[in-house]
Amino acid sequence: MPPAVEDSVLDVDLGPPGRASRRRVIVVLAVVGLIVAAVVGWRLLRSGTAPQPAAASPSATAPAAITLASPSAYQGDAGYPVGFPRTELGAASAAAAALETAWTLDSAQAEQAAVLYAPPEQQDEARKAAAATARGWRETIGLPADGKLPEGAALRTETIGVQWHKRAEDQVQVSLLVRVTATKGAEDDGPAYSSPVAMSVLMVWHPTVRAGAGDWVNTPDPLPTVVPQVALPGTPEFTAAGWKAVTAPTR
């Protein structure tokens, strides 16, 4: 996994041969930070291997876990969390919620979630990119790109580490360490895939969303983005990379 993303548009192979038009769409829309990160996940799952972080072991110097901020409301068919505090922790919590809901095998759910966490002027691009990402995940684990999913087929993204720094007023660069797990469904005897993935995204406070109440949205980052090293919670590498373990807020 490359340690950093140097450009806002990634010129990489995002899919299997013969899907050039779809790859072009995703590359053009790669400025949407949470969609860019799917590239790494696809490559991990396609190979069937995970990066090799150090095995977990107790660490006396490990920082206490951070509890993510609770949302003030839930929207959409699946009850997506929105309305996070106007704080740096609120930005990190919104970033985690956006990624966990937008990475899915269900294109409709992916589109709805991506639009919800995108700035109003970028919602059309976010919708298209999210649909393409969902199809890409499905193809990567051997499922049809479209249509009804087999019973038990699922992709789950769990935030296991976070760090952030304030970029400017109402702008926070958030780095997320997530565990992505994908299964093909009950009727398939193939393996389940699970890999840790790290990414960094820019969260900006947008005062007009959520009916004028304001909230954090994922915005294309114009600057080169440094992605911290992947490491498992509880290891010295995890602490050295600057990660803080997280616990989910109480709903």
Image (spheres, rainbow, N blue to C red):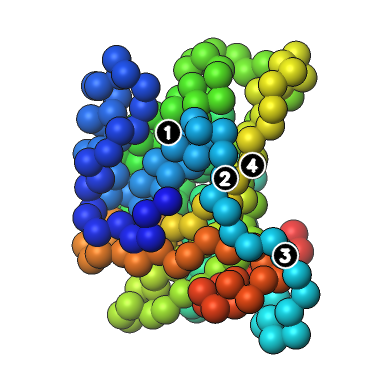
Q: Given the image, on which type of amino acid does mark 4 rest?
A: Ser
Mark 1 or mark 3: whose residue is earlier in sequence: 3
Q: Are marks 4 and 2 in contact (CB under 8 Å)?
A: yes
Q: Which mark is residue 56?
A: 3
Q: Which residue is mark 2?
A: 50
In the image, 120: left or right of 181? left
Q: Which mark is residue 194?
A: 4
Q: Which residue is mark 1?
A: 133
Q: Given the image, on which type of amino acid does mark 3 rest?
A: Ala
Mark 4 or mark 2: whose residue is earlier in sequence: 2
Identify the residue at image location x=44%, y=37%: 43
Q: Is residue 85 above or below residue 12?
A: below
Mark 4 lies on a secondary structure that is strand
Identify the residue at image location x=67%, y=67%: 233
Measure the C-alpha gap from mark 1 to mark 3.
31 Å
What crowding class fits label 4: few (fewer than 14 Cα within 10 Å), some (14-19), or many (20 or more)? many
Q: Are marks 2 and 1 in contact (CB under 8 Å)?
A: no
